[in-house]
Amino acid sequence: MTETHDQATPVKCTHCDKTMSTPVVCDYCHTIGPDAAVVDHFTLLGLPRRFDLDPAEIHRKFLALSRHAHPDFHADDTPEVQQLHLQVSAALNEAYRALSDPAARASYLLTLFGGKSSAEDKSVPDGFLGAMMMMQEELTDALAAEDRSEIARIADVLKTQHDGLIHRIGILFEQYQESVSCKAAVDDLLGELRQQLNAVSYAKKLLAQATDAEHAHE
Ligand SMILES: [Zn+2]
């Protein structure tokens, strides 16, 4: 066995004693696990702690677990268990929201790996702010002039920039997985990841201004 995922070891259902694929809910009897509402988003959805996850797989896991946690399966349960079910449903929704968006997934993963939050480290890559301020000026002018083709062009540039940042984040997470044993390398990578993520937030905000203006004319 050379599996190095941070997967929790399989637990057995407290009700039917079958092995559970996630600590959330039993695949066989729909019993909700005692730790379901307190595990991290990845463990909750039965996914490895990685950035490069297949969006379809995230969606599939979310749907399967939501179905198992459906109130119909728990109508005869005690109020305590029904309360737990509600907590699990809320946790599943939150986990899906956080993991299905690449930037949100990266940000969450970064905090799990011990990196700084966006509140603790607001730095961005060198030269990025200058470039963004120029884009902001161009966009403000285009919005004032209601120049729709110019707004669309700026939106395209921002979308490309955003996708490039997300791609870079994917590479950094790959490097992180390969160098977890080297503390200095890990600190550098987590720092750069935070910068790239801060840059994504800037690009997203500007992109929202541009696309809101585009849609306002539809
Ligand atoms: Zn069971």
Image (cartoon, helix red, strand yellow):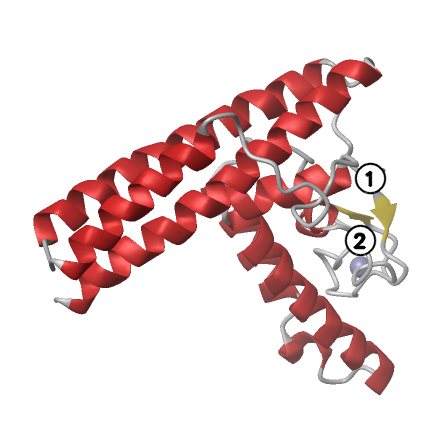
Which sits earlier in the primary sequence, circle 2 or circle 1? 1
Label 2 SS: loop
Looking at the image, can residue 51 be seen?
no
- Observer-nearest of 102 and 22: 102
Q: Quadrant of ligand 1?
A: bottom right
Label 1 SS: loop
Q: Position of residue 177 (x, y in %)?
A: 69, 20
Quarter of the image where the N terminus is located: top right
- Asked if residue 36 lies left or right of residue 123, the reply is right
- Observer-nearest of 83 and 157: 157
- Asked if residue 167 lies left or right of residue 70, the reply is left
Quarter of the image where the C terminus is located: bottom left
Residue 188 got which mark? none
Cα distance between the residues tagged 2 and 1: 10 Å
Q: Which residue is mark 2?
A: 39
For label 2, the crowd category at 10 Å Cα-Cα, with few meaning under 14, some 14 to 19 and many 20 or more, is: some
Q: Residue at x 26, y 36 (%)?
A: 157
Q: Position of residue 76 (x, y in %)?
A: 76, 84
Q: Is mark 2 within 8 Å of ligand 1?
A: no
Q: Position of residue 128 (x, y in %)?
A: 45, 31
Q: Residue at x 66, y 50 (%)?
A: 45
Q: Residue at x 30, y 41 (%)?
A: 135
- Observer-nearest of 133 and 122: 133
- Asked if residue 84 lies left or right of residue 59, the reply is right
Quadrant in which residue 196 is drawn: top right
Look at the numbered discs 2 and 1 and tell me whether their residues touch, using CB distance below 8 Å. Answer: yes
Q: Which residue is mark 1?
A: 8
Q: Is mark 1 within 8 Å of ligand 1?
A: no
Q: How many numbered badges does the structure rendering display?
A: 2
Tell me if residue 159 comes above or below residue 151 in the rendering.
above
For label 1, the crowd category at 10 Å Cα-Cα, with few meaning under 14, some 14 to 19 and many 20 or more, is: few
The amino acid marked with disc number 2 is: Val
